[in-house]
Image (cartoon, helix red, strand yellow):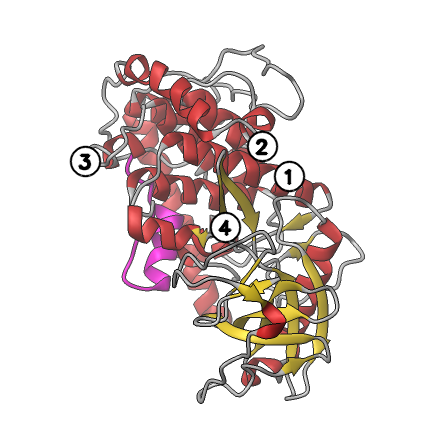
Amino acid sequence: MKACAACSRLYPDDAGFCPVDGNALVSATQVPVATAGDDARIGQLMCQRYQVRRVVADGGMGRVYEALDMVDRTNLALKILHPDVARDEVALERFRREFEVSQSLAHPHVVRVVDFQPTHDGSYALVMEFLYGEELRSMLKRERTLSPARVVRMVSQAALALDAAHARKLVHRDLKPDNIFLCQTRDGDNVKILDFGSVKDKAESAKKLTVMGTTIGSPFYMAPEQAQGLDTLDQRADVWSLAAIVYECITGQVPFSGNNGPAILLEILTKEPRPASNAARDAKYPVPPGVDRVLFHAFKKMAALRIASVGALADALGLAYGLTGDHHAWAVTTETELGAQIDARLPELMKADGGATAMDVAADGFFGESAALDALDVPAPPAAGWQPAPATGPHWAPPDEDLVPVGVPTNNSVLILVAVLVGGFFLIAGVLLVVFVF
């Protein structure tokens, strides 16, 4: 490894100059580490192996350092718990679980975790591969929106990792731009999913860390069943969260907003987001109305009606942008090539916009799906029988457009009013029952 004498950053042996300071690089072992008065760990050897070089980031759980592995002569990231967190048994167990889950997944689009050790100063260190790039959160703060090709490639790679986790009954539960890391390459971003500390293990033998009724996750990206603290949530909660990330990437705003956590969760439970094609009218990149239909199905309040997997979400998103194939192919296609394919189809796709300004969408499963889609007036998803080429993974099966719950007509205002009144009666009765019991 080589290092910069000015900033202590570490680089591979084939690097010549530090892109931050412009200084010529020398052997890392020949560069003394400058101590920092506000952090005694700088320059120290942690876990008898890792020499701490500099602070990379601070988080709610701990501080992240860049360190030199004195055995393998490689640079690594050390995430060391804050003292108060290290004393919390549940938080410590989540930290340990992040190590176990991330190490067991061993996926190219999941950050590689190599060690978990107690430190000499009374904390614990999670040792991970050091990533060059930036979090999606930082990129969105700077760029506000991303190109369609970049979004499709990112979601396709994330879907590969998340589907692998879901196959092992692991639900991430905290997908957000902060936990998606983009490593820049000449072909485009290489995605790494971070922080499996909040993972929910649906396996029967799994140890339960969450008390029933507790919510875990970030409010802006939280599925309704997660917002309610339901123990029944599964991989479709991650589908919702990834769809919320997609919405933010293409519109520059979150789909559900509020001044505080409870207000955001109320929006998620009771409202529908503004159609993305409408929200992005002033954005840098236009959004075809077909994307509205994809996100509409990904934001179903009832998980049973939602797009069933993140792979299927990625497939549907790419198709809405006019691509052919599936997310397995798009994940390895260069961003430039994806962009050219999308640009060729986008004018045609944008002409289909006939009324995507509808602000009010009927509640899931109550007034019937077709009525809600009529309100959006967006093109239909791929026809039944469509198969991706090559068919190397799961694809999106279009839902039944005429699905309407039995006994609830879509165009009879009298019966709808009766249904609403009946629902209101039972809601009030439920509240009174709770008050009486407690």
Q: CA distance from mark 4 to mark 2?
A: 16 Å
Q: Which residue is mark 1?
A: 163
Q: CA distance from mark 4 to mark 3?
A: 26 Å
Q: Is residue 433 within the magenta segment?
A: no
Q: CA distance from mark 4 to mark 1?
A: 15 Å
Residue 259: x and y in percent read: 27, 62
Return the disc, 1 or 2, that comes first in the chain's sequence: 1
Which segment is the magenta one?
Answer: 256-275
Direction from residue 202 to residue 310 in the image, left or right: left
Residue 402: x and y in percent read: 46, 17
Direction from residue 337 to residue 88 in the image, left or right: right
Near-viewer residue (146 or 11): 11
Residue 12 appears in which quarter of the rendering? bottom right
Direction from residue 150 to residue 395 in the image, left or right: right
Q: Residue at x 35, y 56 (%)?
A: 264
Q: Which residue is mark 2?
A: 311
Q: Report the amino acid beneath label 3.
A: Asp
Q: Is residue 181 above or below residue 368?
A: below
Dot 1 lies on which element? helix
